[in-house]
Amino acid sequence: MSMNGAGNSTVSLGPKPRWLQLVGFLGLFVLISTLLVLLSGPASVVAAGNDLREARILQKGKMLVVQVDSAERFAISRLVRQPDLDRPQARYLCLEMRRRGDQRFSRICIGGRRDYRTVAGFARITPDGQVLKPGTIPVKVNGSPGTGLAISFVPGRANLTPGRYAWRVRFSNGNCVDEPLACRSSFPLDGLSVYRVRPVQIVGCTGGDGQVVNHGPRGRKRVALTFDDGPSSYTPDILRILKKKKARATFFMLGNLVAGDPAAARRVLAAGHEIANHSSDHALLPGYSNLKKASRQIREATDFQPCLFRPPYGAINSSVKQSVGDLKMKSILWDIDTSDWMTPGSGSIRSRISGAGSGSIVLMHDGGGPRSQTVDALPGAIDNLRSRGYTLVTVTELLGNRFIYRPR
């Protein structure tokens, strides 16, 4: 013991043992951790038991996009496309949507060891949990868990037609054996959210760069059927055949005829086909104003802005090329000419269509004269192409470009 100048005394006990210092540090750590948990409140408890931080739905073009932000990183390939949500060990990330007034709901689940970024599981679920017609749908999965995930798909592929839907996203990491609720989470946390799926319309296409082409890439077994000079009284018959055969085509229409029968042009687009510019009045080497007028007539009738042009009679010069480029279109010729305008007989037309190969653009007509032979030849010609492994697409798709959609 020692005395200081103020008369107070201090006792020196020497340095604390190391084990006692460690106990003190550990106690301080526990105290600070406890205070942090208490100060953070219920939100921290929710985050610990709910790995989905946020989820939202939006429409982008014709696609429905589900954006998911998760607190935990996990391997998408370990998730199950057709999970049994009652199994404690099930691993899944699923969107569930139920239309107002419908007791059944659609369930889309990503995962699988292969193609998990392009294919998702799909099923319709009854109120008692029965799975109806499980299968798959095409999707596009971008991003990664823990940083934000976006799942895009065409609503119709998941039986989602325009209307109001209750929805939620459900997730489980599969570690629920001991604590059934510890590994499962959903967003919204309680109940369901509401989203209105809107109808979409096609409003344009890409690829209008002024080029002149007469066929598409030869590396894929795809063929584009095209019809000129419509719309006409033959157009509905051709549409019925294409619908029955599940084939798509491109219709090069005359602007004046579209203006006179806008409903016919709208039916072509509604059936999933493409409309393109064939001038306003089938003039030889039409000028800029003619082509601009035809595109305006098509747009006013259908809200669709064409990106393709076919020159009447196949005639094209530097002036037409310049006009087509200025109007952001591409000139489309052909490599298979059926000569159906000469009415050579349905057998001859069918035989010439059957001569198409990979990347071919086939010239036919649905207007400008009697076209019953073309109508008669079409079913057999499509069957022949299909039997040889060809897919029938629009010209825009054949050339590797895309359509532009806008929600209404």
Image: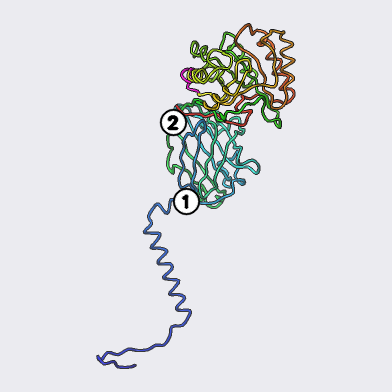
| x and y percentages locating residue 156 in the rendered image | 54, 28
Which of marks 1 and 2 precedes in the sequence? 1
Task: Say which amino acid is labelled 1.
Answer: Gly
Q: Tell me if residue 36 comes above or below residue 187 in the rendering.
A: below
Q: Which residue matches tag 1?
A: 49
Asked whether residue 299 is drawn in magenta, I would say yes
In this picture, residue 138 sits left or right of residue 56: right
- Residue under the image location 48 percent in, 79 percent down: 19
Badge 2, how many Cα within 10 Å: few under 14, some, many 20+? some
| x and y percentages locating residue 255 in the rendered image | 52, 15
| x and y percentages locating residue 135 in the rendered image | 62, 33
Nearer the observer, disc 2 or disc 1? Answer: 2
- The residue most toward the left is 6
Q: Tell me if residue 126 comes above or below residue 366 in the rendering.
A: below
Taken as a whole, is the magenta stretch helix, strand or loop? helix
Q: Which residue matches tag 2?
A: 196
- Coloured how? rainbow
